[in-house]
Amino acid sequence: MIFDKVLEIYQKYYICVHCLGRMFSLLGTCTTNYDRGSSLLLAITMENHKNYLSGDDALQKKAINNLKLLAENANYIPSQKVLNNEGLNYVKNETKQVCYLCNNIFLDIHNYIEESKRILEEIEFNDFLIGSSPSAQIINREDRFKMEFKLLEAESFKSHFNRVIGKEITSNLNKFPAFNRPDALLIISLDFKIFNIKLTLKSLFIFGRYNKLIRGIPQTHWFCKKCMGEGCEFCNYTGKQYQSTVEDLISPEFLKASKASESKFHGAGREDIDVRMLGSGRPFIIELRNPKIRNLNLSKIERRVNKRNRKKIRINDLKYTNKKEVISLKSKAKDTKKVYKAIIKAENKIDKENFNQIVLKLKETFENQKIHQRTPYRVSHRRADKIREKFIYQINGKYIKPTIFEFTLETQGGTYIKELISGDEGRTTPSFSEIFNSKLVCKELDVLKISL
Ligand SMILES: [Zn+2]
Ligand SMILES: [Zn+2]
């Protein structure tokens, strides 16, 4: 019998109405734990009031005991009023009672709601989720309590607490909870005495394309080779090998606009430091972590980045994207087609007629053919030594001077162009150098086009 169980509880402990309702949460729907708890107390009071009025001595005696129990131990006002009206005594508890289960967290819940609201009001979000992590003390005490009274229809402290706060946020801020990847996640750590709230905001992902208009800028951060990032005389105590990077030039405007705590740059592959990125640009995704602002004026950011970095880098084609696209951006980078422009210098002089013959032979050898590239010497310290097969689509050459030629090459993504030209001492075969029958170096290289 539920009533007996409630009376049994108050013989031993004081618990608040919210916690009382939570102990029977699976019974009755479409109501709150508070209403469950207060309905129980009211119903028990009515039942005992009826028994008191019944005229049966035994029933009356028991009813008085029960009403006193609720008046004194549950501090329940309707029971106190019934006793007063019937001229019966009870001992009024003058000190404020503290709920054995929640230490009055539920009675003071407005504190938690106000603090959560204050945090959420400072940010821009569409949906949210409230989570909580009650201390072991709270959880253990409640578990023992449920066992002691064999309370099988109780709800957990956590879900009760989260729901109450969530409901208030929804009605106060007119925002709705999302259980899967919410924009704003609030985790409330609870103790019997103190609490703190941690806010985690879902990252924003923005797709774009960048052009690198000058040589000598790496895509992302490189640590200083001398000090490995510690800071030394060589790097002017910056810890950086290169003073600016594509990432460093692009990110600040995004960070400023979104008020994010940090950003991460994901490129669809990367060009060498001395290679320009021209044409429609290289796709990238910038990840903004913990952004307080989510609705960004992307065209304004684009204009600001481009204005600030005139003649260095440019961005275009900005749009919102998501985390999944970061993975596909990286995996697709291997399957892209790229068009390059290369300025080649030969050791031997070559006349124009001879050059035209060489171009024909290059076309015959390479176009729509596979080449074999062993990991180049210059990157062998950081890449696994293996032989890669790469596909060459198209080659066109232009005579500039007896030792200088310009080529456009269309190749599979990941082809080492400098080595395709030089041969890398036999590590790339076939190579331009073999066909030219001369030592060749790639003096300048630009990426003209990347198609995903
Ligand atoms: Zn309580
Ligand atoms: Zn250094």
Image (tube, grey):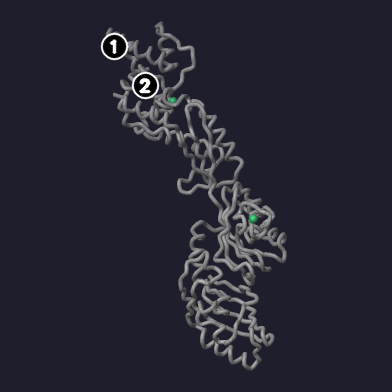
Residue type, numbered disc 2: Ala
Location of mark 2 (residue):
43
Measured Cα–Cα span from mark 1 to mark 2: 16 Å
Location of mark 1 (residue):
59
State whether residue 432 is above or below residue 374.
Answer: below
* Rendered residue at 72%/66% (across/down): 311
State whether residue 191 is above or below residue 203.
Answer: above
Q: Element at badge 2?
A: helix
Q: Nearer the viewer, residue 44 or 387?
A: 387
Return the x and y of residue 140 as percentages of the image width and height: 38, 29
Return the x and y of residue 266 as percentages of the image width and height: 56, 60
* Rendered residue at 37%/34% (across/down): 29
- Is the residue marked 1 within 8 Å of ligand 1, measured from its CB? no
Return the x and y of residue 117 as percentages of the image width and height: 57, 37
Residue type, numbered disc 1: Leu
**Which numbered disc covers residue 377?**
none
In the picture, measured across the screen, residue 64 lies left or right of residue 263, that is left
Q: Is residue 106 visible?
A: no
* Rendered residue at 67%/85% (across/down): 403
Q: Element at badge 1?
A: helix
Q: Nearer the viewer, residue 266 or 165?
A: 266
Return the x and y of residue 271 as percentages of the image width and height: 59, 68
Q: Is residue 348 visible?
A: yes
Q: Residue furthest bottom?
A: 353
In the picture, measured across the screen, residue 264 lies left or right of residue 58, that is right
State whether residue 141 is above or below residue 442.
Answer: above
